[in-house]
Image: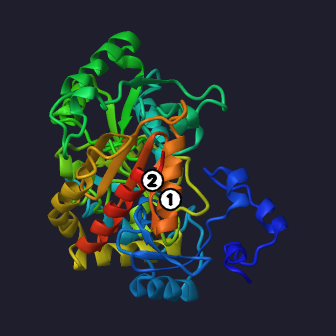
Amino acid sequence: MGQDNDKFAGLSKEQLDAHWMAFTGNRQFKQDPRLIVAADGRYYTDARGRRIFDGLSGLWTCGIGHGRAEITEAISKQASQLDYSPSFQFGHPKAFELAHRITQWMPEGLNRVFFTGSGSESVETALKIARGYWRKKGMASKTRFIGREKGYHGVNFGGISVGGIGANRAIYGQGIEAGHLPHTMIADNQFSKGIPLNGAYLANELEDMIALYDASNIAAVIVEPLAGSAGVIPPPAGYLQQLRDICTKHNILLIFDEVITAFGRMGDKTGAAAFDVVPDIMTTAKQLTNGVIPMGAVISKQEIYDCFMQQGGPEYMLELPHGYTYSAHPVACAAGLASLDILENEQLPQRVKAMAPKFEEMLHSLKGSPHVTDIRNYGFAGALSLAAKDGQPALRPYLVAMAMWEKGFYVRYGGDTIQIGLPFTVEVSEIDSLINALAECLQEVA
């Protein structure tokens, strides 16, 4: 079989057509598939047998690298011992072990863990907890949410409603009640390194929204500490603290969506820790199991949990009528415990923090490259904004990402951005190779 046919990995046209792929240009992909057949460490292998550097850690998920024997052994052992158990009205030991371990990664006060199957489910759960909390407290009018422009909170109806990426909302019609704060990607901060200095004043827009909707009608504000999927937008200095202060002042819950930022990527245990602001509820997923098994978790403050317990009726009744078939899945819990062990034992958040300045320096060396209109970074997350081509903002990032793939590098393209999420175990030489390849692709793509 020739090289051109090898990339189909033996799949027939009928097999390719059967799969309606997620967040993918299906028509283009099925003409020229990019098939991954293996992974090890920081590299994928494609169907042509080429090694591909994983420049996004999977989908911001696999920071500790692929094929870690510790995780493989843990999930194999768990599957042979207890492959599944019901998550409603019954439990298994590893669910409680993992919940407790997660609380040790949280800022002080976040200590009650509810398990989900994904980041989208975590957001949906957090929104329901927020509304339910206020009803339990006798404030049933507090139903509205406030998100932020450019925010990404998964793809369920609650998530796209509070999210602020228009393309993810446009074709689905009415969602839930939600207003949106302005995003913080402003001209004054172009080419900022790390935390931008300007823009804390944008948090004051929340006061205007509260004046419009009234705090008695607002359940929660939800933001990503660092916006990931919109193109790595770090918070301006002081911005998150102002949001925290305004929410506290007006008795509104603050939810941090840390599906991307929790468990090491920011050079700390969480984004909340990195930016020194504590929310009332945090959503997590992705790095929790190193992407090996789908899993998410919502972590809330004790007072929120206590409210449901105190208002739960007879002790045998459900305090929160919510959950998923795969909540606290035994194999996922085993993967989560093994992943957290590796992060701790190898001190990977500390490694990210130590290496982040080098990544910053190398990424910002692309300033002045063709088409680059902005560069942003924090921890092991970085992004380039690219000028539109032929009036199409998404076209040039797609072309650059495809050129990178041909050179042996996987990066994410989304909107007008190229996004990078380095593996936590990356070597400086690999960052150098990635950035050099990007520089070449920016020169080559018209």
Dot 2 lies on which element?
helix
Q: To which quarter of the image does residue 65 belong?
A: bottom left
Nearer to us: label 1 or label 2: 2
Question: Dot 2: within a 10 Å radius of its alpha carbon, few (fewer than 14), some, or many (20 or more) residues?
Answer: few
- The residue under label 1 is 403
Find residue 246 and name its label: none
Q: Quadrant of residue 245?
A: top left
Q: In the image shown, does 10 or 86 lie closer to the viewer? A: 10
Compare residues 109 and 312 and report the one nearer the observer: 109
Residue behind mark 2: 444
Residue 91 in the image, given as x and y percentages of width and height: 50, 70
Q: Amino acid at mark 2?
A: Glu
Relative horizontal placement of residue 29, taking residue 175 as reference (left or right): right
Marks 1 and 2, the one that precedes in the sequence: 1
* Residue type at numbered disc 1: Ala
Helix, strand or loop at disc 1?
helix
Spatial CA span between label 1 and label 2: 9 Å
Residue 335 as seen in the image, left or right of residue 21? left
Mark 1 in CB contact with mark 2 (< 8 angstroms): yes
Q: Residue at x 47, y 45 (%)?
A: 123
Q: Nearer the viewer, residue 373 or 127?
A: 373
Q: Position of residue 111 (x, y in %)?
A: 29, 55
